[in-house]
Amino acid sequence: MEFVIMAKRGEETIAELCRSFGVSRETGYKLVGPNPCGSDYSRDL
């Protein structure tokens, strides 16, 4: 839950959060789901 809340705040990239929480980026994106703002989280690429 904390991962998702932090991801939605947008203060860190999904990749940074994944490293912090020790999960793969694939798992991180699955946890967060689609971005309601329409962004594809491309700043992580």
Image (cartoon, rainbow, N blue to C red):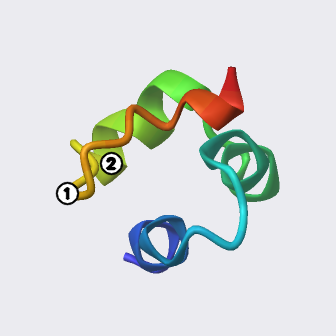
Task: In the rendered view, tell whether residue 31 sits above or below residue 11.
Answer: above
Q: Amino acid at mark 1?
A: Pro
**Closer to the camera, 13 or 42?**
42
Q: Which residue is mark 2?
A: 31
| Picture quadrant of residue 45 | top right
Do we see residue 13 in this rendering? yes
Q: Nearer the viewer, residue 10 or 32?
A: 10
Residue 16 image point, x, y percent: 78, 49
Quick one: 23 or 44, which is closer to the camera?
Answer: 44
Residue 38 placed where, x, y %? 25, 44
Name the image quarter holding residue 30.
top left
Disc 1, SS:
loop
N-terminal-most mark, 1 or 2: 2
Residue at left offset 51%, top offset 68%: 3
Residue labelled with disc 1: 36
Q: Residue furthest front?
A: 38
